[in-house]
Image (cartoon, rainbow, N blue to C red):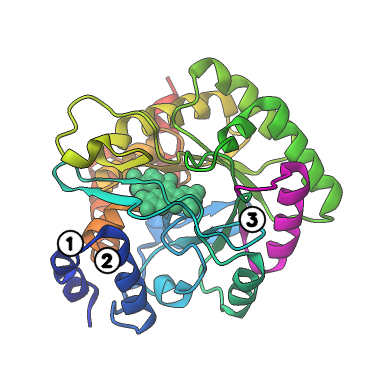
Amino acid sequence: MSPALASSLLPLLRLMDAERAHGIALAALRLGLAGADRTADDPRLSMHAFGRDFRNPIGLAAGFDKDAVALAPLMRLGFGFVEAGTVTPRPQAGNPRPRMFRLLEDDAVINRLGFNNGGLDLYVRRLAAVRRKIPVGANVGVNKEGAVPERDYPALVAAVARCADYVTINVSSPNTPGLRALQGADRLAAILAAVRQEVASPPPLLIKLAPDLHDEELPGVVAACVEGGAAGLIVSNTTTARPAGLRSRNAAQAGGLSGAPLFSPSTAMLARVARLAAGRLVLVGVGGVFTGRQVLQKIRAGATLVQVYTGFALEGPALIPRLKRELLAALERDGFASAAAAVGADLKD
Ligand SMILES: Cc1cc2nc3c(=O)[nH]c(=O)nc-3n(C[C@H](O)[C@H](O)[C@H](O)COP(=O)(O)O)c2cc1C
């Protein structure tokens, strides 16, 4: 089946509960039913970041393949990189269902999954078995019960170190009580110091931030990440805010909002973080991307890499070749010789 055909079947999945539909989509991927994008990427899309080459800057964001069960088929869809997780040290059931809701009128999703996953041991076994044809990131988090972040994050990083091209330290899910307090500059510094002390040569470390951080908090966060030796930041996770104008009846559900309403706030935060980081951190932009023009907006705001989740979940595998075509057209229209040449272009004056 081609990615276009797979995408055309998605409306059927929309008839059922969002989490069930997600399970079926993952199963279909594992069976090879989503097809492959075999076209070679235009060299103008290639990027280089934290010692790795990316054939294009568009990656799959964390949460789609929490247990690393479908990485090989996901790698065939034309992404430049994929991120698996969030994985926690011990398996965890997550919150009671229903806990994932489509907001179709808003091109958005609200989830309060709560880090449901099969735990680190299984995850590492699966990740280690994958041939990494493109860079693979491992996204790690702590359990809801009994977490000791300065102990758990180093152990998580050590466990995935040899089977990931980078590790994302997730301190920004809204669905694990207390997690987002770890975004405080002191806590981040302590976690990064603990990782450096416990793990001899860790892979590049990225810290994933919430879009709900206040502007006043950002300088401290960026300084802690630079000084703590992080390679970069992912901006951003889902938001607990409910922007005015949401139309779906599911808008009142508790949890993190992703998709179209997140594009503006997450891109604005990305630009603020880029100014503060001043080239010292690699930035990954994520939030509300549905078009190649929006990929370019994130790149111009300072992102070297851009991830998608909700757009991919709603549109399916045909999104990826479309984003790449549209990104090339947008680069040409804006007069950039390559995607790399556009990184941070909006910050320069
Ligand atoms: C159902 C769902 C589950 C998610 N799970 C995770 C997760 O486990 N870890 C994580 O770092 N982000 C998770 N995210 C956040 C996404 O990776 C991404 O940061 C966010 O959805 C914004 O991007 P988007 O607007 O393209 O979806 C999840 C998002 C959704 C919609």
Q: Quadrant of residue 185?
A: top right
Q: CA distance from mark 1 to mark 2?
A: 7 Å
Classify the position of the N terminus by image quarter.
Answer: bottom left
Counting other residues with Cα less than 10 Å from the Cα at mark 1, is it few (<14), some (14-19), or many (20 or more)? some
Q: What is the span of residues highlighted in magenta in the rendered image?
A: 144-166
Circle 2: element type: helix
Residue 117 coordinates in the image, percent (x, y): 53, 62
Query: Disc 2 residue type?
Result: Ala
Instruction: Determine which residue is flagged by label 3.
Output: 51
| Residue under the point 50% across and 42% down | 173
Amino acid type of the residue tagged 1 in the rendering: Arg
Q: Does the magenta run of residues contain 148?
A: yes
The answer to the question of whether label 1 and label 2 lie on touching residues, with beta carbons closer than 8 A, is yes
Q: Residue furthest top?
A: 216
- Residue 291 seen from this side: no
- Identified by mark 3, the residue type is Gly
